[in-house]
Amino acid sequence: MKISEKENYILIEPLEAPVLDFVSVLTQKHEGFEDKNVAVSLLAYHQLQKEEVLGFLEISKVHQLNNKSFVLVSNAIGIDELPEDLIVVPSLKEAEDLIQMDEIQRDLGI
């Protein structure tokens, strides 16, 4: 997996081929970034199954408990198919905007 430091979040992109392998690697290395805002780009996957994306649910919940954002970036799956605990947006720009809005809300205590 490729990790890039951005201004107020880290961007994680897969190098592993199957989504489940990527989820497994991400879960193993999660301690290293659980206290940061995270955007995970799944744009390399043109087809995603609900079950594959649900693999990110536990990591997402940990971030929410730590008052940090965890956003998946994908246009290959509908958000209506996923639980509310998983935040999915279709573009990296939208992920950046969402993380920024989350940070503002946390700063304001909302």
Image (spheres, helix red, strand yellow):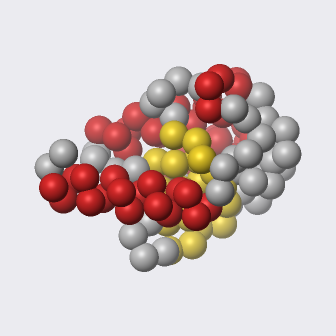
- 104 to 61, vertically: above or below: below
Task: Between residue 70 and residue 27, name the one nearer to us.
Answer: 70
**Residue at the spot 45% in from the left edge and 54% down from the top edge:** 98
Residue 30 percent across, percent down from the top left: 48, 50
71 horizontally vs 50: left or right: left
Tell which of 68 and 99 is nearer to you: 99
Side of 75 relative to 73 (left or right): right
Q: Residue at x 16, y 55 (%)?
A: 108
Front residue of 46/24: it is 46
Residue 12 shows in this picture: no
x 27%, y 60%: residue: 104
Q: Quadrant of the N terminus?
A: bottom right
Q: Residue at x 42, y 76 (%)?
A: 7
Q: Is residue 53 above or below residue 40?
A: above
Q: Is 68 situated left or right of 5 in this image? A: left
Task: Give percent across and percent down for residue 33.
Answer: 43, 58
**What is the tally of numbered marks visible in this picture?**
0
Left or right of 33 in this view: 90: right
